[in-house]
Image: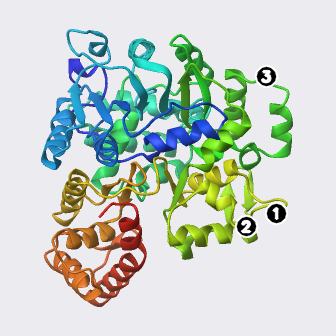
Amino acid sequence: MTSWASGYVSDIEYLPGMYVEQAPGHLILACLINGIEPPLLGDTFDYCELGCGQGVTANVVAASNPAARVVAVDFNPAHIARAGGVARAAGLDNVEFLELSFEEMLDPEKAELPAFDMVTLHGVWSWVSAEHRAAITTFLARRVKPGGIVSLSYNAMPGWTAILPLQRLMLEHAALSHERSDVQVLRALDFAETLQKAGSGVLGSPTLFEQLRAGSAKHAGDEHAVYLAHEYLNANWQPLYHMDTARLLGEAKLTYVGSATLTENFPDLVFNPAQRDILATVPAGPLRESVKDYLVNRPFRRDIFVRGARRMPDALRDARLRDFGLALSVPLSDTKTALDVPAGKAQLEARFYRPVFEALAARPHTLGELVDLPELRGQAGSPSLVELAGILIGTAQALPVPFGLSAGAGAASLELNRAAVREVAEKRAKSAVVAAPLTGSGLTLTTMEALVYDGLARGVPAEQPALLAHVEACMAADAVPLMRDGKRMESAEEARAAVTEGVQWCFENRLPMWRQMGAI
């Protein structure tokens, strides 16, 4: 740790990534679903990300919303240098990256910042000190426009109760070493596991340690150690109760309006009948939200606040929703009506949702067009505008289209996307995020998808044999190891079959979607 880091891991950069819940259209839709008036945005709006890391989200938001003004702040100069370099290389002139601490943001001599329609924070709030949270709150009070949105995600209590002893032990053990944080965290995890095996009953079960070591589809190998270091080795790591967060942000005139995890705004999907009966006895407010966390042991929250929240009449909300668009984000064959939800299983009525999926597979539609489909219009039990939007986007089967159904790729967004997939082709990354201007957001591509996109970006004809040859050339040069179920494929025949299958799938399912969303 260095003194300027204030206890935050700074010797290794945070992992890059895009979080669609921070996208402008997603935040607007979350407000509408909850009946709250969002900012009235045209193409032009002011967007700020605090704790931007390597700047992937900020750059994608800027590239996908070329008339927006984006400001991104981080205290780590390595993050700012990397993010700013990517923006300059892509020709993005509507994003500014600033190296500032949260206290420095309050000093007009350090930064002259505008007022913002939206401010987002991912992975910041419960990883910094109480003093930093107070500075953030002051910034929000000064710099969020009336009616503006604040989105913050954080580790929530009581869902992290069982992990508190483990995190403290790992933090203190890591402090004994002067090695890099990603090395420290693995050794600290080893030490904690020896205690657990010796009979310590407060450090969880063997299953917990297996999960901590296993990584995920998003973070594997060396990246997983970096993730663990940033998650567990910050000196001010402190999961927070929603009620404490809401009360602090209330000092900035911010009111909680709903969750950016859209399915959490539908009680029937989250709570069983007995739990819903209990919630009905608790007045709306911070305590009720925290009671929800007690009932389902929620470890992570994506809260949305509005500065000067105004409730909308249902008719006005529905009128706004009718003009809001959706674009299918999965192949038609992968759409589903049987859902796994916190409350158990949910079944969407196929007679309503199948026509919706088929319509979206043809092209993006407004919600008004979808509810006016012959199979839905006037039919008893057909889904409402709120349900369609919340369920389809909340289950990652669609993306919002907030600013009209036509948006093509711009020069800057295409250059940003080419650079992102080139990182994968040249073995500097395992996945890529590309701007999708139709959605005002971005798409995360797997290794295979990124290699196919890279071929197209380099001028390879949009034909399966040519794209297959490009991907195989990357593999032959060992630029990208091909994995299946977490293991590298050693058999040439197995690898070729997998590559052929993957290229065909991307060509048939991903390329049309990229074109539709203006991503290529």
Q: Which element type, helix, strand or loop, lies under badge 2? A: helix
Confirm or deny contact between disc 2 and disc 3 (CB under 8 A): no
**Pointer 2: what residue?**
352
Task: Name which residue lies at 40% across and 35% down.
Answer: 232
Q: Which residue type does callout 1 highlight? A: Gln
Q: Answer with mark 1 or mark 3, whichever residue precedes in sequence.
A: 3
Circle 1 SS class: loop
Depicted 214 relative to depicted 140: above or below? below
Residue 346, position as x, y percentages in the image: 74, 59
Q: Which residue is mark 1?
A: 379
Query: Marks 2 and 1, how far apart in space?
Result: 9 Å
Q: Quadrant of the N terminus?
A: top left
Residue at image mark 3: 283
Q: In this rendering, does residue 459 appear at all? A: yes
Q: Say which label, 2 or 1, has the lower sequence index.
A: 2
The quadrant where residue 318 appears: top right
Where in the figure is residue 310, as x and y percent of width and height? 63, 24
Against 161, is 322 above or below? Answer: below
Residue at point 56%, 53% (across, down):
393
Image quarter (top left, top right, bottom left or bottom right) of the C terminus: bottom left
Whether residue 127 appears in this view of the structure is no
Query: What's the residue type where badge 2 is placed?
Result: Phe
Of the residues shown, which amino acid type is indicated by label 3? Pro
- Of circles 2 and 1, the one toward us is 1
Cα separation between marks 1 and 3: 35 Å
